[in-house]
Image (cartoon, rainbow, N blue to C red):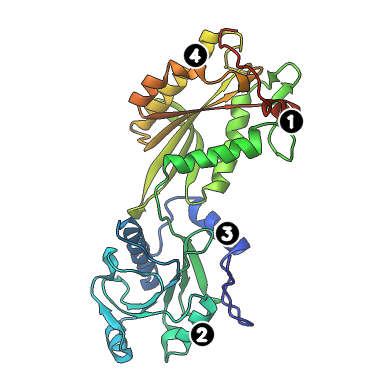
Amino acid sequence: MPDMMSEGVDRGLWANDDQAETARVAWTALPEPLDEASDIDRAARSMARTVMLRVRNRHASDPPAPTVVLITPAWRRIGKALGWSYVPNVDDGSHPLSGAVFLCPANLRASHKAPLPATDLGAIFDWIEGQDGLGLMPALVLNPSATIPELRLYETGLAHPENVSSYPLFLADLDLPTLDGVLARFYDGVVCAPGGGRKCAKLWEDADTFKAVVRPEKAIQNELFRFLHASLPHLRPVEEEDTPLGRLDIRLSGPASTDETIVVNHAVIELKVLGEGNRTPPFTDTQAIKDHVESGVRQAASYRRPPSASRIALLGCYDMRPHASQRGESCLDHIRPLAASESVAVRRWPLFPNVAALRAHLLPGPSIDEGS
């Protein structure tokens, strides 16, 4: 991450513990409303909506440069005196935001605008403070290079960086490729096989006989819940939620990209373990495995509908049967038409009882027929 401080002058950190606390406070209890009685907070909401509209504009191609918004009721008079250009509709997403400083009222409906002289925040702050009075105006700063996109709110101006607060900025809805990427990292880094530097709750009672612990699905669910919480800080995962249609394994909710004041359900995840364990069929019964998978598709499909009403429904199957990596996905073939008709994504990951089994998987071997 680039240095956000000019040399020798503390401008307020954008990362590390400060940013982690920002994410924790802002997303632990959704929704997190800002104080609508405050001009700077109303401006923050307006800025968030403006950025989201800009992101969704198919013609938008803003450079990855900071944006600074200065809030003042005298925006028109000062902007004219400085010779900045007038933008009457800055809030509709049609104008580039990056690389510019705006003088605006609290609702951001219109502004006077000037290009920033640099991309380094320290240099930008020094330049603004050098303009008579601008450094003392309430300010919003958006840095697109931050790990977690966020608005920095300087209530007493850029000249007083100690009075700063941060709000994560939700820029996009969760989509299936993004969720797949997170689940793939969870598989590779956590549950694929014990050992090899992975840290995970115990999943295997006896690795030699491929015997799982009593409740492997619950152990995987707990690990996945924590992983999703850390990997998607802009969303709120909920597990074991009771609904009229049953107990949902994991739900991901968060603000809609078009309006951060609206919280929606982005995804529901139903988990199934294939193999021995509590409430799972024995690996020797092929039909039981197929029935187990089909029930998972039907559960995930039902959770997509109200009251959960999630945009994405995914069934994740963790295969703990002996030689699961060689079995292929024939146990899923019978439910693919149903899953497609119900818009349920189905994924399967083979689990290994130890690193030696994982190494063996990396060598070519014959496939095993599901009837064996």
Horizontal side of 207 relative to 216 (left or right) equals: right
234 or 263: nearer the viewer: 234
Front disc: 3 or 2: 2
Q: Amino acid at mark 4?
A: Lys
Q: Check disc 1 and report the residue beneath it.
A: 355
Front disc: 3 or 4: 4
Q: Earlier in the sequence, mark 3 or mark 4?
A: 3
Measured Cα–Cα span from mark 1 to mark 2: 55 Å
Residue 207 figure quarter? top right
Q: Residue at x 42, y 79 (%)?
A: 116
Q: Check disc 2 and report the residue beneath it.
A: 126
Residue 80 figure quarter? bottom left
Measured Cα–Cα span from mark 3 to mark 1: 36 Å
Horizontal side of 143 relative to 265 (left or right) equals: right
Q: Earlier in the sequence, mark 3 or mark 1?
A: 3
Please provide percent x and percent y for residue 91.
28, 67
Q: Check disc 3 and report the residue beneath it.
A: 21
Please provide percent x and percent y for residue 251.
46, 37
Q: Check disc 4 and report the residue beneath it.
A: 290
Q: Residue at x 54, y 79 (%)?
A: 122
